Image (spheres, rainbow, N blue to C red):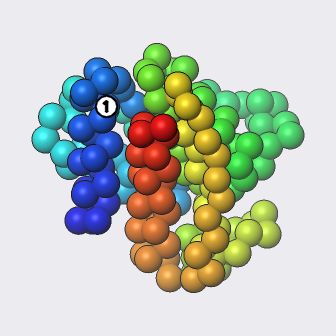
Amino acid sequence: MKELVGVAEQVAAKLIARKQTIAVAESSTGGLISASLLAVPGASAYFLGGAVVYTRDARRVLMDISDDGMKGFRSSSEPYAKLLAEQMRSRFSCDWGLSETGATGPSGNRYGDAAGHSCMAVAGPASEVMTLETGSNDRLANMQAFAATALKLLLKNLEG
């Protein structure tokens, strides 16, 4: 968690300096991204909200994305990560949306992705989507790696 908070502190400093806000949708990180951003004192200046979108029901209820709205998308993919980030940005009327979706392990997901697969996206003044493959089936290590990579992706886009 300390590594995550270290990156979150850098993100927080940039968001506070710019008077910008963020909302987070995460899946396989289970709230680690949001927890890291909230661990920084003064988080209320930039953090508007977050959701752990771990199931279809969560996607429907928390993200307001219907089954019909998922046509052409599948979970744990770059297009879905982009959709989540854009949806958070829109729903919270904030500057930045950040999302993560993947397969932590110890086995892969039902879509054929191996453990250690995660897609993440930033939506905002700058946008980027990426896939991380850790090659590991260690659930806790993957959760940490996915959260760290998502925060670093956000930081990179804040600096760009």
Q: Position of residue 80 (x, y in %)?
A: 70, 43
The answer to whether one can see residue 58 in this image is no
Q: Is residue 47 above or below residue 29?
A: above
Q: Is residue 115 above or below residue 34?
A: below
Q: Nearer the viewer, residue 41 or 35?
A: 41
65 left or right of 87 in image: right
Locate the N terminus and report the quarter of the image it occupies: bottom left
124 left or right of 119 in image: left
Q: Residue at x 85, y 37 (%)?
A: 71
Q: Position of residue 18 (x, y in %)?
A: 31, 24
- What residue is disc 1 on? 15
Q: Residue at x 25, y 57 (%)?
A: 6
Q: Residue at x 59, y 35 (%)?
A: 127
- Look at the numbered disc 1 and give the secondary structure of its residue: helix
Furthest toward the top, the residue is: 93
- Name the kind of residue labelled 1 in the image: Leu
Q: Residues within 10 Å of mark 1 (few under 14, many from 20)?
A: many
The answer to whether one can see residue 120 in this image is yes
131 left or right of 22 in image: right
- Give the quadrant of residue 23: top left
Q: Residue at x 77, y 49 (%)?
A: 74
